[in-house]
Image (tube, rainbow, N blue to C red):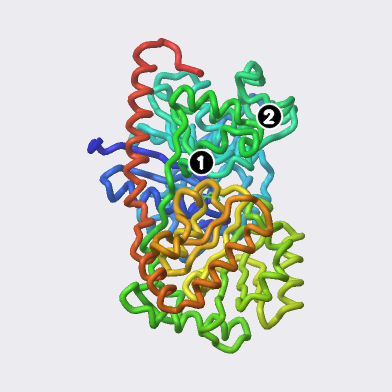
């Protein structure tokens, strides 16, 4: 296990360069943690103009090459490196497919063929770079990079057959499903439009391809790894996922958070620093957050933060159903996020209607996110499903007590508070019902009213460890297993295995 491995991690978003959600945080922080364990991990992402043209990053072109995709489609790719990155970070420009991504909010507005081109380019890049560096493991993430593990096998070249592949599902709700005729664009042989391939109810499903062709698949929490094998959470891939599990190829590894970025003792974005030993800075952060929201600083009000993509996944309909009642409790709600227009409208309207109690910012604002994590007393995350969730871990680090629905990674990280024994690190409910959420908030507010008890809770959760030090080793083990599996296949069959 101590052997150093060469890993190339591919992701459509990587923090701090481009970020929409938790995928970026993981793609930014896991490689650093693995690097600290002694592994040679490198990262590749599309060359968005927001990165290549940003003076904050020093970006240098490395080489140019051709990417054949299918007989009537090829692209010129340019490989760049971000010289200031903590681990070697490559940016791939493929034709002009990503050139409109001038800010994070635009990265997913590209034509989906961009990802086809990107995946082919990554595979080509590995061959082009063979003179200096070859990964032993290609680690792909979510549907945008799902074609890579498929291409590695269909190439049927020993060079590619030797490279193990690991695929991480950060969110099963986005699978990259397209109409049948899109298949021709993938450059894959027609035989793979099959139930044992990428065919999915008459359409094309890129993630399904990755599930079938990767050596190992994992998702970002043990509970979600189980949940996705049921029809309720499986998004119609539960059958494939059950099969992977039966073959021992499906794992759940809980994410960690970047303890350098998220540190209340050093965070440059918050007005005062603090630690479990001295919480006075947290009181300052809260007072300033209240002021920023246009309220009188008032320690007796429980400030509830919500920083989230505003999508159905996040359980926002529960809040919609019960918002007015929650606001009758002695609470104030601070919201930051973008997403579904109907939720954006809802929170804007709530803000207008209850200015003294609700403040909503619709947009991306990293510094404000930090101020909310630090300045809130509680953090709301009533997710319908949650592969892992990072907000609850960040909250714990900042002494902000999560109120969560017990699902996926939330169930794996939050233990319900038990007043008698004073154990647990959050407030939780299980049934996906507004009333259940209400009761959890009510309980949190009640405990908040007992100042001493609350501050003991805050101090206790701040001492928990949610850094990558818990999980980076589990990824290293997964890589090692994938390598072994690959070595076995490469020696026992002349043909690369397509499973
Ligand atoms: C997605 C999931 C979230 C997870 C993150 C990183 O955003 O919705 O639960 O924490 O990916 O893996």
Q: Position of residue 397 (x, y in %)?
A: 41, 65
Disc sitting over residue 174 in the figure:
none
For the question of whether residue 149 can be seen, the reply is yes
| Lateral position of residue 280 relative to residue 388, left or right | left
| Lateral position of residue 232 relative to residue 6, left or right | right
Q: Quadrant of residue 465?
A: bottom left
Task: In the rendered view, tell whether residue 113 sits above or below residue 156.
Answer: below
Q: 325 or 463, which lies in front?
A: 325
Q: Quadrant of residue 289?
A: bottom right
Q: Secondary structure at mark 1?
A: strand
Q: Position of residue 42 (x, y in %)?
A: 38, 44
Q: 51 or 220, which lies in front?
A: 220
| Label located before the other in sequence (1 or 2) | 1
Q: 313 or 443, which lies in front?
A: 443
Q: Image point 23% across, 38% down: which residue?
A: 2
Q: Image point 39% across, 82% down: which residue?
A: 280
Q: Residues within 10 Å of mark 1 (few under 14, many from 20)?
A: many
- Residue underneath mark 1: 141
Q: Position of residue 214 (x, y in %)?
A: 48, 28
- Residue underneath mark 2: 204
Give the Cα separation between the discs numbered 1 and 2.
Answer: 18 Å
* Total numbered labels placed on residues in the image: 2
Q: Quadrant of residue 111?
A: top right
Q: Residues within 10 Å of mark 2 (few under 14, many from 20)?
A: many
């Amino acid at each position: 296990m101590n052997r150093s491995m060469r890993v190339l991690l591919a992701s459509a978003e990587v923090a701090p360069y481009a970020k929409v959600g938790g995928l970026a945080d993981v793609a930014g922080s896991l490689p650093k943690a693995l690097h600290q364990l002694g592994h040679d991990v490198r990262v590749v992402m599309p060359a968005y103009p927001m990165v290549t043209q940003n003076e904050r990053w020093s970006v240098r072109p490395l080489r140019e090459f051709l990417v054949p995709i299918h007989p009537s489609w090829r692209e010129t790719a340019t490989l760049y490196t971000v010289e200031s990155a903590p681990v070697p970070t490559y940016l791939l420009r493929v034709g002009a497919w990503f050139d409109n991504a001038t800010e994070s909010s635009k990265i997913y507005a590209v034509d989906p063929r961009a990802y086809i081109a990107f995946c082919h380019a990554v595979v080509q890049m590995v061959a082009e770079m063979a003179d200096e560096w070859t990964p032993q493991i290609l680690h792909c993430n979510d549907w945008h990079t799902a074609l890579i593990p498929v291409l590695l096998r269909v190439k049927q070249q020993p060079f590619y057959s030797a490279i193990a592949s690991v695929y991480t599902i950060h969110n099963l709700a986005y699978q990259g499903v397209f109409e049948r005729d899109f298949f021709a664009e993938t450059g894959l042989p027609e035989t793979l439009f099959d139930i044992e391939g990428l065919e999915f109810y008459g359409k094309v499903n890129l993630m399904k391809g990755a599930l079938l062709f990767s050596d190992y698949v994992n998702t970002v929490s043990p509970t979600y790894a189980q949940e996705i094998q049921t029809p309720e959470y499986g998004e119609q891939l539960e059958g494939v996922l059950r099969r992977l599990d039966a073959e021992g190829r499906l794992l759940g590894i809980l994410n960690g958070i970047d303890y350098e970025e998220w540190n209340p003792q050093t965070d440059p974005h918050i007005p005062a620093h603090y630690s479990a030993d001295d919480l006075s800075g947290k009181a300052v952060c809260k007072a300033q957050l209240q002021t920023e929201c246009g309220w009188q600083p008032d320690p007796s009000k429980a400030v509830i933060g919500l920083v989230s993509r505003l999508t159905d996944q996040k359980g926002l309909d529960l809040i919609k159903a019960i918002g007015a009642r929650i606001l009758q409790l002695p609470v104030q709600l601070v919201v930051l996020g973008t997403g579904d227009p109907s939720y954006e409208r809802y929170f804007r309207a709530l803000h207008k209607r209850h200015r003294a109690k609700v403040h909503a910012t619709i947009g991306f604002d990293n510094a404000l996110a930090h101020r909310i994590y630090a300045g809130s007393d509680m953090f709301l995350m009533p997710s319908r499903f949650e592969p892992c969730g990072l907000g609850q871990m960040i909250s714990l680090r900042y002494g902000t007590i999560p109120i969560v629905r017990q699902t996926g990674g939330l169930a794996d990280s939050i233990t319900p508070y038990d007043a008698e024994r004073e154990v647990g690190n959050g407030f939780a409910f299980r049934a996906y019902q507004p009333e259940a959420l209400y009761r959890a908030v009510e309980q949190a507010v009640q405990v908040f009213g007992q100042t001493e008890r609350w501050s003991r809770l805050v101090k206790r959760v701040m001492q928990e460890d949610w850094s990558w030090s818990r999980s980076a080793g589990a990824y290293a083990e997964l890589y090692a297993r994938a390598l072994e599996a690959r070595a076995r296949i490469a020696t026992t069959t002349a043909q690369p295995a397509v499973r």
